Each structure stands twice: as structure tokens, then as C-alpha cells.
Image (cartoon, rainbow, N blue to C red):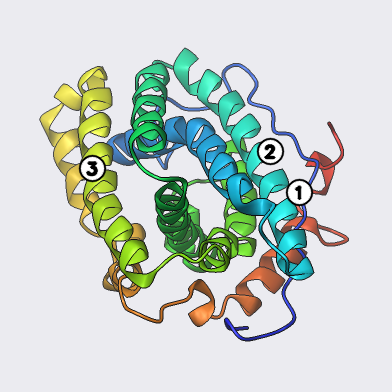
Amino acid sequence: MNATDPARRLIRARRIHFDYPSGSLDRHYVDGDLVMSHVVAHLSATFPEGEDFFVRSVRRFAGEITDPELKSRVQGFIGQEVTHGREHRALNERLQRMGYPMGRADRATRRVLGRYERFTSPLTCLAITAALEHFTAVFAETLLGDERAQALLGATEVRSMLLWHAIEESEHRAVAFDVYRAAGGTERRRIWAMRGIMVSFFASVIAYSTLSALGDRATYHPIRLGRSLAALRHSPFLTREVRARMRAYTQRGFHPDDTDNTALLDHWTTELFGADGTLIDHLGQR
């Protein structure tokens, strides 16, 4: 599949729900890893406000789209993102009860995205959305394609939720990008938006994950903290390949579908939602 293919995979929102019963999660739920547990918690905290921002940014241009195929994909994108926001709110409530400061990152995300909407144009907000969608798609496909990344999440309900989120991010990874192009967005604006987001994204992850970890008693155990920081250097989400995919977005002529994800989506669609899929029992609950 590439940017010129006339046929695109159907994008549809799945009616799904996840439960996090009291006591079902370990404090450091990412394979017992101190730092990665705080990083993933921070990222989850940003999703509800982020997904709402993505939906608003795309919706502003939905009425200008004339291509019926792209119109259909936009509707699927909106449905999926609304569901992602809802399910991450449920996870965030559970993590808050476990002691993670989810509200702080949620409020900070709301403030930052609100400033984008107040002080930049709708087209720039759409460029920012397309850039952030690339981030989530690259991390999503790393999770789906790297067994080391999957192993970090064990067999918890968090693993199930993140795999579902990952497959849908991979399905709609090009929608905001294609709406941006259809709206007349330039390569220059798209590339500069990504360069700015690269700096702000990683700065916020480092800053808020550090603040979160400072409130965790385990952080003050030098050996445990040292091992966790050492493991972070070899994280499957920070490999040379992941960094190269991030940088590729800043090249002129780039399109998200330059990287073929067909086999990955086929495998995980069957694994999660096929006749014997592991998440079939999660569907249709709402």
C-alpha cells in the first residue's frame, strides 16, 4: 500500500471497552520497569485532550473535502479517535488511583493545545495534528512489530488496550495528513510543524515523566533507578529505525504510506478481532 493506491483499508470505529478491576495492575505495570511505567502513564495522560484536538483540527476542514473516499476515512478517523479518548480516560482514572499524577499532564496538554488553537491558524493546527499522528503511528507500529515492545506489557488489560489503540492508529495514520494536503497545506508548513513538535514532544515526555517519577518512592532506590535508566537506552521505542522513521517526515515528498503496514495490520486484525481473536469479548460492550 502506498500514497497512490486507489484502494484503502476501511477505517471504522470498533465498539470496545476495557476494564481495570481494583488491584489488577502492579504499581510498575510495564514489566516492572520504573521509568517506562511513568513514561507510558504520561503518554496516556496526554491522549484524551490530544485526541479531542485531533478531531477538532480535522473537522474544521471536513466540509471542504470533495473526495468521497477521503470523506469516509475522515468519519472513521473521528469515530476511532473519540473512542480512544474515552478508553484512555478510563485507564487514566485507574492510574491516578495507583498514584500517578495524571491530572497534571492532562491539564498541561489542554493548555498547550489551547494555545495552538488561539495563536495559530486552523491549517497550522492541522499540520500539528498530522505530525503528532506520525509520532503515534510510528510508536504504534513499533509495538505491533517488535516482540520486545510487546513483552514489556506482559498480559495485562493495559497491553490489550494499547494493542487495540496501536492497530487503529496504524489504520488511520494518513488521514490527517491527507486532509492537510487536500486543504492546500504546504510542504514547508508541514515540515516546520514537525520540527517544532519533535522538540516539544520529547521535552514534555522527559519533564513530566521525571516529575511523575519524583513522586514515586521507588525512584529513590539507586540500584533500581539505575537499572531502569540503563534499560531505557535499549528500548525498542528508541532504536535507530524508529528515529529514522521520525526524521523521514521532514523530507519533502514524504507520505505516511511510504512504509507498508499491510502485513502488520492483517496479522493483528486477525490476532485481535478474527474468529478466535483475543479481544472479541471486548467488542460490543458499549
Residue for point 85% across, 33% down = 285
* Residue extending farthest left: 222
Q: Which residue is mark 2?
A: 83
Q: Where residue 228 is drawn, which disc sits there? A: 3
> Is there CB contact under 8 Å for labels 1 and 2?
yes
First in residue order: circle 2 vs circle 3: 2
* Distance from Cα at disc 1 to Cα at disc 3: 36 Å
Horizontal and vertical percent for residue 262? Answer: 64, 77
Q: Nearer the viewer, residue 224 or 229?
A: 229
Residue for point 33% across, 41% down = 36
Q: Which residue is mark 1?
A: 13
60 left or right of 150 in image: right
Residue for point 48% across, 64% down = 147
Quarter where residue 73 is shown = bottom right
First in residue order: circle 1 vs circle 2: 1
Asked if residue 286 can be seen in this view, the reply is yes
Q: Of tags 2 and 3, which is closer to the observer?
A: 2
Q: Secondary structure at mark 2?
A: helix
Amino acid at the residue labelled 1 = Ala
Q: Nearer the viewer, residue 194 or 241?
A: 194
Q: Residues within 10 Å of mark 2 (few under 14, many from 20)?
A: some
Amino acid at the residue labelled 2 = Thr
* Distance from Cα at disc 2 to Cα at disc 3: 32 Å
Amino acid at the residue labelled 3 = Ser
Q: Residues within 10 Å of mark 1 (few under 14, many from 20)?
A: some
Q: Secondary structure at mark 3?
A: helix
Q: Nearer the viewer, residue 196 or 183?
A: 183
Q: Secondary structure at mark 1?
A: loop
